[in-house]
Amino acid sequence: MEFIKRVARNYWAVYYLAYVGGVAAGLWRYWQRLTADDGILWLAAIFGASAGSALLVAILLEVTGRMVLLIPAAIKKLKAEGRKEERQRIVNALRQTGVRENGTTEVRLTTAEVIKIVNGESDERS
């Protein structure tokens, strides 16, 4: 997981290295054919295959990055927002039902009543 995070931060370098590595491997593998009459065609094929490989790496990293890195972050954000909203609903429910005596607020509710108020089933005490 840590490796994926490091790679995702420098994704452009991975694309570049995939392309350069593909070109180097193609030149090394097909060097004898490059000196023939149709050498330019082999050179174009090497560069095209390298570009395709780099594109495949880019697609795989983007999909992996989105699925592995961004989706969990989005889920954490949504959960945090939900918890914040739930706490706010509880605070509002307790404020609505407080009984004021001598300038202080005293809440007299059963657990079932608080749950009903938080769930929006009832705005008044039963």
Image (cartoon, helix red, strand yellow):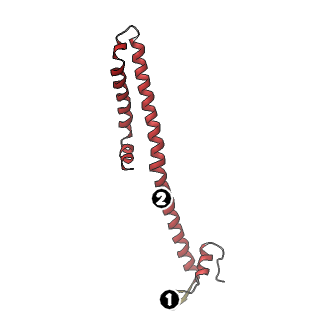
Q: Secondary structure at mark 1?
A: loop
On the rendered structure, is 92 left or right of 120? left
Counting from the top left corner in percent of width and height, residue 72 is at: 47, 54
Residue name at image x 63 percent, y 76 percent: 116
Badge number at residue 103? 1
Q: Quadrant of residue 17?
A: top left
User: In the depicted view, which residue is nearer to us: 30 or 58?
Assistant: 30
Q: Which kind of residue does numbered mark 2 sit on? A: Lys
Q: Amino acid at mark 1?
A: Gly
Earlier residue among tags 1 and 2: 2
Q: Which residue is farthest bottom? A: 102
In percent of width and height, residue 124 lies at 65, 80
- Name the residue rendered at 42%, 18% in the picture: 44
Residue neighbourhood size for the residue with mark 1, other residues' Cα within 10 Å, grouped as few (<14), some (14–19), many (≥20): few
Q: Position of residue 115 (x, y in %)?
A: 60, 76
Q: Is residue 123 above or below residue 105?
A: above
